[in-house]
Image (cartoon, rainbow, N blue to C red):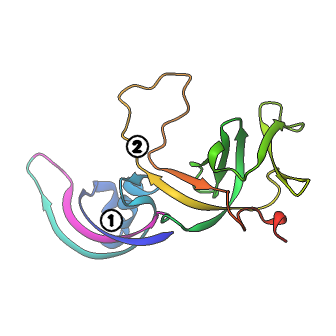
Amino acid sequence: MFYLSEMEHTIRLPPHFLHLPLKEAIKEQLEGLFLDKVISKLGLCLSVYDIQSIDGGFIFPGEGSPTYTVRFRMIMFRPFVGEVIGAKLKESGSNGVRLSLGFFDDIYVPIDLMPKPSHCEPDPENKNQVRWIWEFNGDNYPIDGIDEIRFRVLSVNYPSVPVEQEKETKPFAPMVVTGSLDADGLGPISWWV
């Protein structure tokens, strides 16, 4: 789920950072550029782990900032296919459920990957949402958002950035995880305790 990715980046260090020690200034600038951003095929950038090397320090004509080539390692979030992860219910709809890890909210479990047989009914607590119910041996087991929900990762996609986005559509997600609740041990923890 979490990886160290080694990267190299050429960075301009603005003059207002020059009062700091060089490594600290570069780390702060890298965090401003990369934290909470998704890099395709690498995942979500969470933290600069360490700086391996700093080369350069050249000031090019017409610029007042030194330019450095920096090799560094970044802690990335990128779940692997087949991994089982615990999450919380973010929202529930007629198309399935959306889960959240707290720092990442684009985890979707579509209808065909819900436990079988299951159905949805209007949620009495949230008027705009539905509540999914798994039917097993004559009993109903709800996905109500109280417990941690375990899901299996089926795919991790990096959709291309849309040129235009209509006002009524949901916000663009640069990394989308599709999960499944349709196996033993998956779903709210209270189902299995």
Residue at x 78%, y 31% (from the top left corner): 128
Q: Is residue 110 visible?
A: no
- Bounds of the magenta segment: 62-78
**Figure quadrant of the C terminus:** bottom right
> Dominant secondary structure of the magenta stretch?
strand
Q: Mark 1: few, some, or many residues within 10 Å (few <14, many ≥20)?
A: many
Report the number of discs.
2
Q: Is residue 128 left or right of residue 6?
A: right
Residue at x 59% of width, y 57% of height: 103
Whether the magenta-drawn stretch holds residue 104 is answered as: no
Q: Amino acid at mark 2?
A: Pro
Distance, label 2 to label 1, CA atoms, is 30 Å
Residue 8 or 95: which is nearer the viewer?
A: 95
What residue type is disc 1 on? Ile
Instruction: Judge whether 95 appears above or below 112 on screen.
Output: above
Rendering quarter of residue 163: top left
Residue located at (91% from left, 53% from top): 138
Is any part of residue 77 visible from this angle? yes
Looking at the picture, how far across and down is residue 137, in whole percent? 88, 58
Residue corresponding to mark 1: 26
Does residue 54 lie above or below 40 as drawn?
A: below
Q: Locate residue 95, reporting x and y percent.
A: 66, 37
Left or right? Give the position of 154 relative to 15: right
Residue 64 percent coordinates (x, y): 19, 51
Q: Which mark is residue 159?
A: 2
Between 130 and 118, which is closer to the camera in this rendering?
118
Residue 192 sits in quarter: bottom right
Quadrant of res 42: bottom left
75 in magenta:
yes
Extreme-left residue of the structure: 61
Whichever of labels 2 and 1 marks the residue nearer the N terminus, that label is 1
- Other residues around mark 2 within 10 Å, as few (<14) / some (14–19) / many (≥20): few
